[in-house]
Image: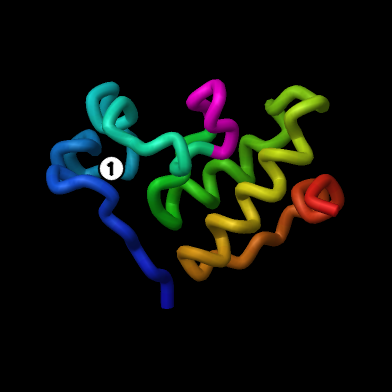
Amino acid sequence: MEKTKKHHPRYDEAHYPGTDRLTAEGRHELADSDFGLPDEHKFPMPDAAHVRAAESYFHYAPDDKKHVLARRILQKAKEFGVEVHSENVLHWAK
């Protein structure tokens, strides 16, 4: 069973209706800690669906940032009860 976490009071308004996609306003309201690359505000992970998305888009991250992103993905995956299957993410997290 997955955990979900609502980081701001208007969680439903932060997503496009009927999707897990964040609106621009919703993305702007996220805390730095909700991003895989906080300094750049890239790879948002406010919930389990976004952790899975970050895992699947991991290969787009620049090589010099992959170790940071991989560790953040694993941290958020643990927080939301998501299993990480990407060998690439697991390798870079070491």
Is the image coloured rainbow, by chain, by secondary structure, or in one colour? rainbow
**Residue with the mark numbered 1:** 19
Residue 2 location (% of width, % of height): 42, 71
Classed neighbour count for the residue bearing mark 1: other residues with Cα under 10 Å, few (<14), some (14–19), many (≥20) = few
Q: Quadrant of the N terminus?
A: bottom left
Determine whether, in the image, residue 39 is placed left or right of residue 25: right
Image height check: is 28 above or below 78? above
Q: Residue at x 61, y 66 (%)?
A: 83
Name the residue type under label 1. Thr
Q: Is residue 40 magenta?
A: yes
Is 17 displayed left or right of 5 in the figure? Answer: left
In this rendering, would 3 be left or right of 71?
left
| Magenta extent | 36-42
Res 31 → quadrant: top left
SS assignment at label 1: loop
Residue depicted at 66% across the width and 61% down the height: 84
- Residue appearing at x 75%, y 49% in the figure: 89
Residue 81 image point, x, y percent: 50, 70
| Left or right: 7 in relation to 80 | left
* In the rendered image, the vertical position of residue 73 relative to residue 85, given as above or below: above
